[in-house]
Amino acid sequence: MQYEGIDVSVYQGAIDWASVARAGIRFAMVRAGSGQTADSRAAENARGANANGIVLGLYWFSYAYTVEMARAEAERLIRFARDYDVRFPLAWDYEEASVRYAAQQGITVSRELVTAMAETFCKTVYAAGYTPMVYSNLNMLASYVDLAAIDAPVRLWLAQWGAVLPTREPMIWQYSSTGRVNGIEGDVDRDRAWELPAMPARRLQTLADVPPSLREETEQLVESGALRGSGAGLNVTEDMLRAMIVAKRYTDSRTDG
């Protein structure tokens, strides 16, 4: 079975994640940062995916040109991931722009160096309990990244646009850079996966999200202080909300009796 996904960063602007979910997007790879800098919309995007039942993965665009820099990028990504329900991999995104940046610093990267950096990133991610992944295209795989030499359970996220099917067998295939999805203005990368973990339960953030049959009792929970909103809203699943309502009904019946 095939599952449709997207990958996003600050360049997509503000995203209406509820509309994205209704459009049939099942997973999202969210850029957490690049080099030493966090993506300014990473937290907003990760929360949006989690709140709307979209399986979340994360990636870091690399500007590393030493093994230690690659390890630091992995550690930054892991720290960010801890605050969210991440069920898809943590990916290292190393591209031609990464090679050019190293050259600007006077470093000519080799296949051996890039593979060593990828391995360090993947081992660091794996040791933290996440699935490591490398984003690449066929040219980069041929010239710079030897996945077979990486001593870690690395998964491949392959960029191959316009193909009928990917030439290699990836976990995620990025098949277009000019996709369109409701809830996102302009182009967005489109991805496809052939495996998907259990979907996180959609979290209700406002009273408008609550099923009409439960809304009155939800308002009572809020008024009583039993259910508190936050900057992100109510932040409860429907199952959690139903359990709270049942508990309130039981407490009320005991008080009335």
Image (tube, rainbow, N blue to C red):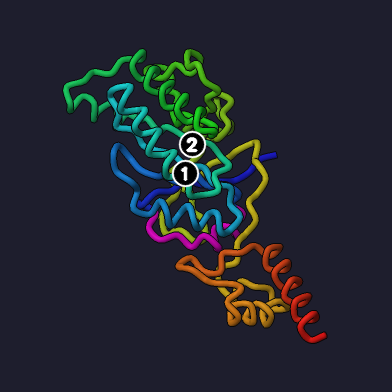
Q: Quadrant of the N terminus?
A: top right
Answer above or below: position of 226 versus 171.
below
Q: In the rendered image, which quarter is residue 66 located in?
A: top left
Q: Residues within 10 Å of mark 2 (few under 14, many from 20)?
A: many
Q: Is residue 46 left or right of residue 248?
A: left
Q: Is residue 58 left or right of residue 13?
A: right
Horizontal and vertical percent position of residue 215:
67, 79
Q: Nearer the viewer, residue 230 or 24?
A: 230
Answer above or below: position of 130 versus 225.
above
Q: Which residue is mark 1?
A: 81
Horizontal and vertical percent position of residue 65:
28, 24
Q: Which residue is mark 2?
A: 90
Inspect the magenta stretch and tell me whether residue 156 lies in it. Answer: no
**Is any atom of residue 189 visible in this view?**
no
- Whether pointer 1 and pointer 2 mark residues with C-beta atoms closer than 8 Å, the reply is yes
Q: Quadrant of the C terminus?
A: bottom right
